[in-house]
Structure formats: structure tokens, C-alpha cells
Image (cartoon, rainbow, N blue to C red):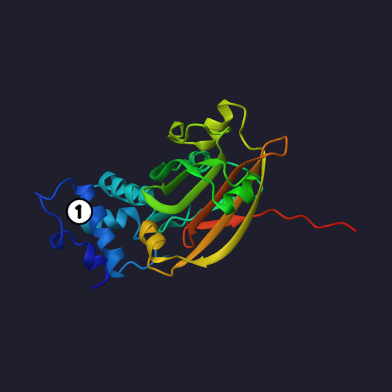
Amino acid sequence: MNVTEFLRPEHWLSATAGPRYVQLRRRIEEGIASGLLPIESPLPPEREVAAITTLSRVTVRKAIQELVDKGSVVQKQGSGSFIQDSTLRVEQSLSQLTSFTEDMSNRGMESHSVWLERGVFLTSSEEAKALNLEPEHSVARIARLRHAQDRPIAIERASLPLDLLPNPLAVTSSLYEVLGQDGNRPERATQKISAVNLSEADAELLDVTPNAAGLKIERTSFLSSGRVVEFTRSLYRGDAYDFVAEMRLAHP
């Protein structure tokens, strides 16, 4: 079956199946899922889809706009609409220190988190070393599954000295916003990035197959005084994140 035949209304359009633009959007999604409309292939022009489906151009435009909003279709000025991989990809600059919430907001993306852990705990040897604490000290820990556009893309586990975050429950959205209220927002950080294969438990949280490629990020953040304020270990889906660094030619 070709695309024209696939879109003919007698195959899918019904008076009892909801708004027509929704039915058309679902039909196109079926074509994508089946491979009839492969990634990077063009959709027929809007006027052609309207003629094939007997729908108005307003209805067709609304259906395509929903696909654009969901990331299944990209519109290129002067070229038309094309099927794209709807797997979310985010570019993260390595030259700026921002929170996940701020980063997604700056991109116009909706974000939310699922809490995995939040409270006060005895410090581990790794935390004590990273935060320059004595082993008998306690730390504030927060762990979250991060979502962007309703897709899980990162597991973030942060540890902080208790005097800088005495109440982990105060963090409901942005950690940096809470720290900034007391003048403790970090001003610089070092990061180590390594490739990993995701464990079964982490893969399940990130909605990928076990042993899928991931990125492990260890970040140590500092106050202007040089004191360590945050030690964060994060796992990112390998198919969702690109880290970008600007580099300049070194002069002799």
C-alpha cells in the first residue's frame, strides 16, 4: 500500500471516532509505526493530504501541528514536512552551569521529576571524599528521575553538606533555586563524562533495554569561596543527550 492509498478516508475516517484532525494524526502515526512513512521521508503537501482525505486544510494543518508538537514531524521552511525520529535529543553546553529545570525551561520544554530518594543519610566514603567531609558526618541526598516532554532522560543523584541544605524536603523543583535563596548557588563545577552500559534497574527507569548505551556524569560544584557545595552522579540515556563544548585554538 502506498501513502496515497493509506490516507484514503474509507480506510480509517469514522463519524464516531472523535475529531477528524485527531483521527488523521493517529493515521499518520500508524504509518510511521508501520514503516510506511520512514524517518526523514516527506509528508505529502498539505493541500494534497486535504484532497486525498477529503478534509479541510485547516483540519490537516491542525493534525500536522500536533505531530510537530510531539516531535514526530519537523517542518522545514520552503521544503515541507518530514518524518523525524521522535526520540528526544537535547544538546547540553559544557561551558555553562545550569540546573536541569532551568535548562529545559530555556529550551521551552516541559520538565518534571519523579523522586527516588530525598533525606538525610550517613555519608559514604565516596561522598566524604568528594565533599571534603569527615566520615561520621551526615549529608543531604536527593535522587530524581528527570523527564523532558514526558520522556525519562536522566537519573540524577546529588549529595550536599547538611549546613548548605539542612532540609532536603525543601527541594521541590530546582535545587539551585533553593541553594540560591541562602546565597549558596554554585558558581563553577568540574565534570567527568564516561560511557556506560545501563544496568537492568537503571534501564527500566529510563525506559530503555538493559545494557543500552548511557552517559555517566560526575559533577563537583563549588561556591565562589572554593568550598564544594554539591557532588552529583547522573546517568543519561545515550540516545537523548548530546554534550557540546566550545573550543578555541591554543596559542603558543
Nearer to us in this view, 47 or 249: 249
- Residue at (57, 41) in percent of width and height: 137
Image: 85 above or below 183 = below
Identify the residue at the far right of this view: 252
- Where residue 217 sits, quadrant-wise, is bottom right
Nearer to us in this view, 73 or 100: 100
Q: Secondary structure at mark 1?
A: loop
Q: Position of residue 126 (x, y in %)?
A: 58, 54
Q: How many marks?
A: 1
**Does residue 84 appear anywhere in the picture?**
no
- Where residue 160 sits, quadrant-wise, is top right
Identify the residue at the far bottom of this view: 1
Q: Position of residue 185 (x, y in %)?
A: 61, 34
**What residue does disc 1 label?**
54
**Does residue 150 appear anywhere in the picture?**
yes
Q: Residues within 10 Å of mark 1 (few under 14, many from 20)?
A: some
- Residue at (34, 47) in percent of width and height: 65
Nearer to us in this view, 187 or 125: 125
